[in-house]
Image: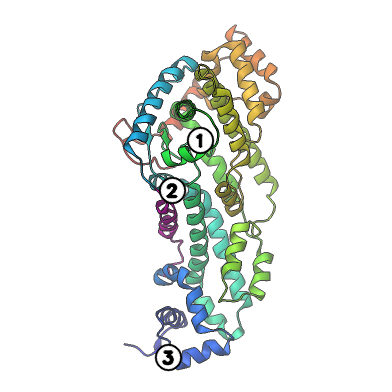
Amino acid sequence: MPEDDDLSPEEQFRQMLQRLLAGQLDPEQVAQLSAMGVDPSQLAQAMQQMQSAFATGDGGIDWEQAKRQALHIANQSDLGVAAGARADLDSAFALATLWLSEATTIPEPSEKPRAITRGAWVEATLPVWQSLAEPVAASVADALTATLAEEAPDDMQSMIANAGRMLRGVGGSLFAAQLGQVVGRLSTEVVSGGDVGIPLMPAGQAVILPQNFADFGAGLEIPEDQLALSVATRELAHARLFRHARWLQLDVTTQVAEYARGIHVDTSALEDIAERFDPSHPEELTRLLSSGELLPEPTPQQTAALARLETVLALIEGWVDVVTADATSRLPEAGRVAEVVRRRRAVGGPAEKALASLVGLELRPRRLREAAAMWRAVTDAVGIPARDALWDYPDLMPTAEDIDDPAGLISRLLSRASGEAPAPDAMDEALAQLLAEETTDPDDGPDAEGPTPV
């Protein structure tokens, strides 16, 4: 075994950290840490959460750590899906399917709706959360590495420079751990697959989390069968829309990615904490990550991307609102359920707020009521088939201006119906087909399993 003096600075640094974590530092190494004002025992405790980064040292972000953290939280209180709850939801889905066929011309997807556990929701949706968080995690990791290098003593600069990839992994691991906690807590709040507003589940897959559904209904004094029918109808409407407009899933995720790519960490905040950082108390860095203080104000490009995203989310939720209202018109408490859902979506739960702080993005449709009013006006003016045809091609989808002025949109639709306005040409159809192919898994079908890559 080579002596320490024969090792590169990076290997010496790695070896010291590994020995520290294992409690195997020799007296000379303990003295080196003490001379730096660091209590070795406290440092060892603080760095346990970074062990995966030290083990690999490849500079990558350990997303498996985020998955383990999320599943740990989800499974702690996951009671599974009782046979009775599954049967009740299956019945609700079956009746909701019939009612939806009267309220929309968008066809029923081939995928069978399911009741799933919190852990299954984490497994299915984590790849999407990872794609949202990855640009921010990389920015945090890079900024942390640069800041630590600037604040380190001169005699450690060469060591830190050689261990830069590993330090980057430490920053990424801290972020991944935070993301895992947020997604784990979110799994205890969401009621269905479309609850957050963005396409988390494979297109066409409708799901409800029975345990969370029970928590959602507690205290509302609404009959459980009516609540189940309302929630099932809303979830199936989401699934129908994303299955039919396959380009829509790509459009939403692309806009989210555009926003995320523009995020940069506020290095001045990191520098401030680095000056007073106590290795025995890493919770300050964790607090900064979860509070959103490391993320500066959005750039003009991000603000524009966010406005486009909010418009799309509002259009989706507004359409779902109108279709669900029409499909559940037989239910005496349908209006109350709809208002509860709207308020819940407008405010967001604790975990959704934590996610917004972590990735700098709120996934709430701020103009939901205005968008729903637009869709209602369009439905009354031109009918259900013409309304739903607006989801056939990307360039037919209403805009923010249409939400402000539904009369203008209705006028264009009436003109098109009478032959006064041009219909989509062959190029539009070819573009729509290309987008559909890009979002379609070649193995996709009734028997396909697992989430569709985003």
Q: Residue at x 53, y 21 (%)?
A: 323
The magenta segment is: 57-78
- Kindly identify the residue that appears in the image at 68 percent across and 50 percent down: 298
Q: Is disc 2 surrounded by few (<14), some (14 to 19) or many (20+) residues within 10 Å? A: some
Q: In the picture, residue 377 is in which quadrant?
A: top right
Q: Nearer the viewer, mark 1 or mark 3?
A: 1
- Pointer 1 residue: 217
Dot 3 lies on which element? loop
Residue that badge 3 annotates: 26
- Locate the C terminus and report the quarter of the image it occupies: top left
Q: Which mark is residue 127?
A: 2
Q: Is residue 399 shown to the viewer in this render?
A: no
Q: Disc 1 vs disc 2: Cβ atoms closer than 8 Å?
A: no
Q: Are marks 2 and 3 in contact (CB under 8 Å)?
A: no
Q: Foreground mark, 1 or 2? A: 1
Q: Which mark is residue 442?
A: none
Q: Nearer the viewer, residue 163 or 99?
A: 99
* Inter-mark Cα distance, 1 to 3: 59 Å
The residue most toward the left is 447
User: From the viewer's perspective, is residue 160 above or below residue 165?
Assistant: below
The CA distance from mark 2 to mark 3 is 42 Å
The three-letter code of the residue at mark 2 reads Pro
In this rendering, position of residue 87 left or right of residue 342:
left
Q: Is residue 327 above or below residue 80?
A: above
The reply to whether the magenta stretch includes residue 70 is yes
The residue lying toward the viewer, choosing from 136 and 364, is 364
Residue drawn where x is 68% and y is 56% of the image: 296
Check disc 1 and report its element: helix, strand or loop. Answer: helix
First in sequence: mark 2 or mark 3?
A: 3
Q: Mark 2: which secondary structure?
A: helix
The reply to whether residue 161 is visible in this rendering is yes
